[in-house]
Amino acid sequence: MSGDLLVVEKKQLERFIQAGPKDFTLLYSFTRNGADSAIFHQVCDNNGPTVTVIYNTSGTVYGGYTEISWRSDSGTYYRDEHAFLFRLQQNETYAPMKFPVKKPDSAIYNYNSYGPTFGGHDLHTFSGKPSDQNGQYTTNATYSFGHSYDMCGISTEQLTNNVKTITELEVYSVTDSILVPVWREIGDWELQDLEELKNEMDSWSPPQGVGLKSANILVLGPVGAGKSSFFNTIASVFRGHVTGQAVCGSAEQSITSKYHKYRVRGSALTKPMKFKLCDTRGIEENQGIDGTELNYLLEGNVPNGYQFNPSTPISPEISGFISKPTLNDKIHCVCFIIDGSTATVMSEKMLEKIKALQTKVRQKGLSQVVLVTKIDKVCSHVEEDVSTVFQSVAIQELVDKVSGILGVPRSHVLPVKNYEKELNVTNDVSILALLSLRQILRATEDFMFNLLDVLDDENDSLE
Ligand SMILES: Nc1nc2c(ncn2[C@@H]2O[C@H](COP(=O)(O)OP(=O)(O)OP(=O)(O)O)[C@@H](O)[C@H]2O)c(=O)[nH]1
Ligand SMILES: [Mg+2]
């Protein structure tokens, strides 16, 4: 997926804005919402300060910041003394530069059929509906750089390579990054003992009498949400250093191509814990796991190591199909993984797909939890210090939104920061990961206690 501001770029914009820590919430994106000025206005109007970021096909990233809301006017200039244009990358090389406003009275221009427009018009990003050819958008942008903004000697050619074809345009709302008193009580973070949490997970086992050796937790979610990284994060906590056992990365299509039921252990010599994290291929709008395939996964028909094949859906004909699965083969809890930095702009198609899968999970009586990853990209404070997660207003709002969108109680929406850039494990990231794992195992137990009830009822009726 193209786009997505890097953490380092957000930090740079924060420095350009010069008004303390900021959070960037994605409001609109060409690739997720569609390239259409009407949609832009629908989701971005009256949202206060925003930053618009353009990614062109020559690897240059640039855009503009304004404190003034976008509106569906019929052509009005607005004053903004703090507006500026900027460049973050030039030909795929990090090259940050700020271009301050020099005529604040014409800092932005609001017009109902235009996309974000800065100055008169230094940067008119698009109008109407730019055409999309395989993820490349031909915009009808116009540039008159230098009219209302001081370009500091940088020419249009130098800023944009004179390229008007772009792979992404994003609009983020910019808010103060605020910490408040703890909104989710998990006990005093400082007193959370990592070793104690590790021991708790290590000694966890399915309830006695249910007849299970270990729990199968299915990990489901869109491409690139951080499913494999979550397994790596949990494995890293127990191994004591950051591991890359599951292959991770970013691509248009899922990096994970095989169904892998991962066991977690401290080292090759220690016994695995009594749960498996079952990693899957990412959900895509038009392919990937659908209701029928999910049914086979939940029922335990799919063998470990199965190679997902988008053109041949799972069926009883696949090699190794387990036709008579036991309770030990079945899934006992489903963990949806959602990218927190894009959760609020998920496309309707993707949302529909996830909701259909959730319905299937509910029909089976299985517990479900939602992990919201990449919280370091959502809150500036959390990026610096993960232990502030339950004091962050941005994360609290994100949890509320995801709970509303997916119809899952807030207690089952768990923010997570995966190990991704780190070389060594840190207490805070590990504690947060294990707090989530604890909730997942508790949800797994809920399902198992229901099973126990059924078994006890059967025994009672035999007596
Ligand atoms: N900043 C940040 N990046 C993350 C986090 N979790 C995962 N990533 C990055 O997101 C990208 C995708 O992660 P994966 O774990 O491969 O995602 P996946 O859901 O397994 O994706 P597919 O297998 O392709 O469906 C990788 O580059 C990770 O490093 C996180 O919490 N924070
Ligand atoms: Mg993966």
Image (tube, rainbow, N blue to C red):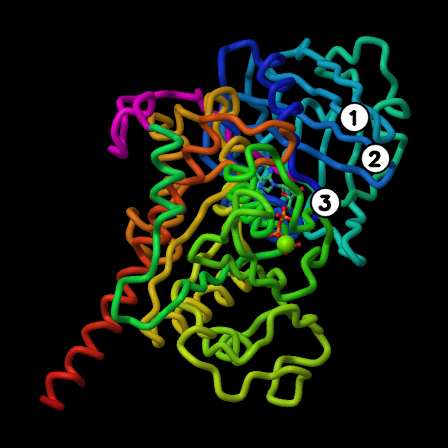
Instruction: State ligand 2's quadrant.
Output: bottom right
Q: Quadrant of residue 82?
A: top right
Q: Residue at x 85, y 10 (%)?
A: 153
Q: In 3D space, how far apart are the residues under numbered discs 3 and 1 (Cα atoms)?
A: 14 Å
| Residue type highlighted by circle 3 | Ser
Question: Would you say 460 lies left or right of 5 here?
Answer: left
Badge 2: few (under 14), some or many (20 or more) residues near its Cα, within 10 Å? Answer: some
Q: Label 3: which residue?
A: 2
* Residue 286 image label: none
Q: CA distance from mark 1 to mark 2?
A: 7 Å
Q: Secondary structure at mark 3?
A: loop
Left or right, residue 256 beside residue 262 = right
Numbered disc total: 3
Does the beta carbon at disc 1 come under 8 Å from ligand 1?
Answer: no
First along the sequence among labels 1 and 2: 2
* Mark 2 vs 3, N-terminal side: 3
Q: How dense is the environment of label 3, judged by Cα within 10 Å: few (below 14), some, or many (20 and up)?
A: few
Across and down, in percent, residue 2 comes to: 72, 45
Q: Is disc 1 in contact with disc 2, using a CB cutoff of under 8 Å?
A: yes
- Element on which disc 1 rests: strand
Which quadrant of the figure has residue 398?
top left
Which residues make up the magenta segment? 170-192
Say the numbered circle drawn on residue 59: 2
Any part of residue 205 in sight: yes
Q: Residue at x 9, y 88 (%)?
A: 463
Residue visible at 53% across and 56% down?
263
Which residue is identified by label 1? 89
- Kind of residue at disc 1: Gln
Residue 269: where, in percent of width, then height?
57, 47
